[in-house]
Amino acid sequence: MTAAQPGTRLIGELVDAGKAVVAAGLSPGSSGNISVRGDDGRIYITPGGSSLGALDPDRISVLSPEGDWLSGDKPSKEIGLHLGLYRKNPDHYAVVHVHSAQAVAASCVSPWSEASALPPLTPYFVMRAGQTPLVPYRAPGSADLGKLLLAIDYPFSSALLQNHGQVTSARTLAGAIDAAVEVEEASRIALLTAGQERRLLTDAEITELTGRYGSDWTLGNR
């Protein structure tokens, strides 16, 4: 038995990731899109209008490293968003963009700070997602979204898109999904505690977590 070709393996991982995102309650209806990048730079992304829980491996869109459509169905209109985050984090190989309810709600209110729309209320948010800036509104599919991600001059791998949803990247699909789950949970907790006196993680606690887990947080941004 021969080993699966890299593209076949990555497409299989993408199909499994779609099911995981739906099972986690992050992707209502046919919303959201996921991509994974191969070692050769090719990008495999879910087609536009597809249900993430029922992806057809034969219809996954395949793109060049520059984002040119090579094969499969027409790619998601959010390819610019994915390309922007890959360029922001060149050592990452997966991007998850979803319209999960709590993250959408959090994206509709004022951000907690410039560097993070969500406050450091739990260690899991700091560990798995890190600071999560609010990206100004652009219509879904706008090429400006990727440019706005790249214009942010501090490190991050998760973001809220104003009045839209969330996007995360990581070295693996599992890591990007974990971050998306944590952004959703952090959004829920932030909304539940809004208007109350919060006990935030201290700078020392954040430094210990980011040092141990390699996540990003700009200290002093309160």
Image (cartoon, rainbow, N blue to C red):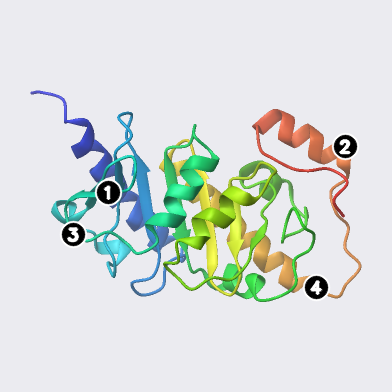
Q: What element carries label 1?
A: loop
Q: What distance separates the C-alpha of mark 4 from that of mark 1?
A: 43 Å
Position of 72 with respect to 200 (left or right) is left
- The mark total stands at 4
Circle 2: residue type: Ala
Is residue 25 placed above or below 155 in the rendered structure? below
**Residue 90, position in %: x, y?**
49, 34
- Residue drawn at the location 78% of the way across and 43% of the way down: 218
**Residue 217, position in %: x, y?**
74, 43
Q: Which of marks 4 and 3 is in front?
A: 3
> 138 or 24, which lies in front?
138
* Mark 2 surroundings: few (<14), some (14-19) or many (≥20) residues within 10 A: few
The quadrant of the image that shows the N terminus is top left
The quadrant of the image that shows the C terminus is bottom right
State the mark number for residue 194. Answer: 4
Is residue 216 placed above or below 180 in the rendered structure? above
Query: Residue 116, located in which quarter of the rendered image?
Result: bottom right
- Residue drawn at the location 58% of the way across and 45% of the way down: 157
Q: Which of marks 1 and 3 is nearer the N terminus?
A: 1
Write down the residue under mark 2: 204
* Mark 3 surroundings: few (<14), some (14-19) or many (≥20) residues within 10 A: some
Q: Are marks 3 and 2 in contact (CB under 8 Å)?
A: no
* Mark 1 surroundings: few (<14), some (14-19) or many (≥20) residues within 10 A: few
Q: What distance separates the C-alpha of mark 3 from that of mark 2?
A: 48 Å
Position of 119 with respect to 60 (left or right) is right
Q: What distance separates the C-alpha of mark 1 from that of mark 3?
A: 13 Å
Write down the residue under mark 3: 73
Q: Which of marks 4 and 1 is nearer the N terminus?
A: 1
> 151 or 50, which lies in front?
151
**Residue 186, position in %: x, y?**
67, 60
